[in-house]
Image (spheres, grey):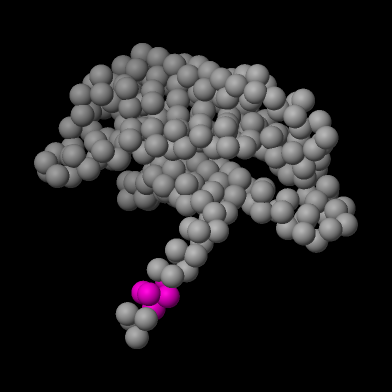
Amino acid sequence: MYFFLLHLALLDLASISTTVPKSMANSLWDTRTISYSGCAAQVFLVAFLFSAEYSLLTVMAYDRYVAICRPLHYAMLMDTRACVRMAAAAWATGFLCAALHTANTFSIPLCQGNVLDQFFCEIPQLLQLSCSNAYLREVGLNVVSACLMFGCFVFIVLSYVQIFRAVLRMPSEQGRHKAFSMCLPHLVVVSLFISTSFFAYLKPPSMSSPALDLVVAVVYSVVPPAVNPLIYSMRNQELKETVKKLIQLVLVQQH
């Protein structure tokens, strides 16, 4: 679990670093410019990191399934070699998806200006600047990506169905509590990541507006990477005590 958490932390750190620093710099210098190559790099990195994170969360669901449903086989199924291969597959999947989306997006001529109503270069916003029928290739690519994402989603759901069935059959209350505490952080992270991403890309066009698109982009691109470390750290007893003391101190100062 900690091996995969290391990769998740690296992905979260990289995804925050891809969009937020440039946006902060533009705010400080009162500008909204980005170079063509910088925009392409941002598109590639965002697609790469988010695809890799989704793949990694799917792998982590399998890790939790094996740990709880097949504990006697865990050491054999999740040995060092298997973990390295799964992590490498997650990174490779992200790279492949990002390469296809970036190459396809920037092969489409942009003839509707060069102004994006967004704080980073986002593929849907770039496609709105195109007046070419080539955008149908991107639609097809999005359909394939959506099918893959849906397959991962179904795998995660089925894994947790098996996990909850196994946990509820445990005779020991302490064992059930330990199993739930092991799975709850991952389940919260997956729910936050999937709900924000799906709403951002699958919301109906009637709900689309520049202000709403900006808020949704901030939610799905900034909130999950920022909150994930806190969610997993809440299993740390020392951190819990520190947060509790901090809350008590704030309440005392308010009174």
Query: Is residue 194 left or right of 71 when viewed as pictured?
Result: left
- Residue 246 x/y as whole percent: 40, 68
Q: Nearer the viewer, residue 32 or 128?
A: 32
Q: In x, y percent, where is residue 199?
A: 51, 45
View extreme (bottom): residue: 255
Q: Is residue 29 visible?
A: yes
In the image, 242: left or right of 21? right
Horizontal placement of 175 versus 23: left or right?
A: right
Magenta segment, prevailing SS (helix, strand or loop): helix
Give the x, y percent position of residue 74.
76, 32
* Viewport quadrant of the N terminus: top right
Residue 237, given in percent of the width and then of the height, sits at 55, 58
Q: Which residues are magenta?
A: 247-251
Instruction: State yes or no: residue 16 in magenta.
Output: no
Above or below for 172 versus 158: below
Query: Residue visible at 44% across and 16% down?
Result: 99
Quadrant in the rendering for residue 130: top left
Image vertical order of residue 249 relative to residue 230, above or below: below
- The answer to whether 21 appears left or right of 139 in the picture is left
Residue 124 visible here:
no
Residue drawn 76% across the image and 35% down it:
66
Frontmost residue, 62 versus 107: 62
Could you tell me how many numbered marks the image carries?
Answer: 0
Outermost residue to the front: 238
> As rendered, which of 230 and 149 lies closer to the eye?
230
Query: Which residue occupies 77% across, 59% down?
Result: 174
Q: Quadrant of the C terminus?
A: bottom left
Q: Quadrant of residue 112?
A: top left
Instruction: Say whether residue 249 is magenta.
Output: yes
User: Measuring 44% from the left and 43% from the top, which residue is drawn there?
Assistant: 225
User: Is the residue 180 above or below the residue 59 in the image?
Assistant: below
The image quarter containing residue 104 is top left
